[in-house]
Image: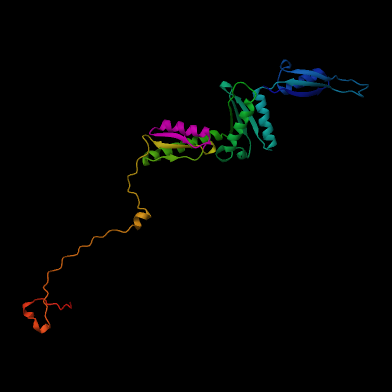
Amino acid sequence: MAILKELTFTAKSVEDALALASQQLQKSQDEFDYTILEEPKKGFFGIGSSDAKILVKYTPTLKEATDEFLQTFIRNAKIEATVHCEEKEGGELAYTLEGEDLGILIGHHGEVLDSLQYLLSLVTNRHGDDYVRITIDIENYRAKRENTLKSLARKTANRVKKSGRNVTFEPMSAYERRIIHSQAQEIGGVTTHSIGSGDERRVVMSPVGGPKKDFRPKKQTEQTQDKPKVVYEYNPVREPRTIVKAKSIEDINLADVEDTEMVNL
């Protein structure tokens, strides 16, 4: 449901008040209703004279409501900026802001700018039946950021195709993710998909056919490294020997036995 706005205008006559209202609202008198609150008074020799006062009622267009909200936002934020709006095909409203020190309205990777655009879209579309697309740009930031993302997508694609591994981008807005997806389709040899949710939504770029398998041997774990090794030792068979018993060494003929070893049995 559209908002009905009411404004008062004063002038020396009702006709002058209507002309003033038409000029400020940039509407013809057929586009608004009015009520005469006070008729002009001439007074006596100028004493006690008063102007005419009228109450004007009108329904602002979606663009007018959006313009007013954006201007009020900028004024309350104490930012000096000039607002331009271009009405494009399909009813899209494309806003551009010009001024000095507007980086605060852009934020890190356009986060503040995206939030402002989303807020403005909510304000614009909460009363209308048909959806109106809203875009906001500051100092040509959108085009610069788009070129940066396209370059990043190309470099990442070369890296993915060379290494055969997936690469995950940092979290991005839906608008920036679409740029990466679109650029990947033009490059070829890679595919993209998104993971995560909300502000942590990211794009993953993969080589066509999936990442390469890793055939490198796995490193030994501590448990495997600490496990004792089994060592097999070869013990040669000793040479056979003859044991001779006697009451004393003198009773044995040592000449008959080579390599004699005295063993105490």
Residue furthest left as drawn: 256
Left or right of 189? Residue 38 is right
Observer-nearest residue: 162 or 137?
162
Q: How is the image coloured?
A: rainbow
In the picture, measured across the screen, residue 183 lies left or right of residue 64, that is left
The one nearer the camera, 197 or 205, is 197
For this view, does 239 lie left or right of residue 73? left
**Is residue 193 within the magenta segment?**
yes
Which residue is painted at 62% across and 25% down in the image? 125
From the viewer's perspective, is residue 216 above or below residue 201? below
Q: Nearer the viewer, residue 117 or 104?
A: 117
In the rendered image, the quadrant that contains the N terminus is top right
Position of residue 148 relative to residue 55, above or below, is below
Please tell me in which quadrant of the rendered image residue 2 appears. top right
Image-based side of 65 in relation to 257, left or right:
right
Which stretch did the figure color magenta?
A: 172-197
Q: Residue at x 12, y 83 (%)?
A: 249
Q: Position of residue 196 (x, y in %)?
A: 49, 37
Quick one: 225 or 133, which is closer to the camera? 225
The number of numbered discs placed on residues in the rendered structure image is 0
Quarter occupied by residue 223? bottom left
Position in image of residue 195 (x %, y %): 47, 36
The outermost residue toward the bottom is 250
* Image quadrant where one finds the C terminus: bottom left
Whether 264 is among the magenta residues is no
Residue 37, image x and y in percent?
Answer: 83, 20
- Give percent across and percent down for residue 61: 66, 22
Q: Quadrant of residue 56?
A: top right
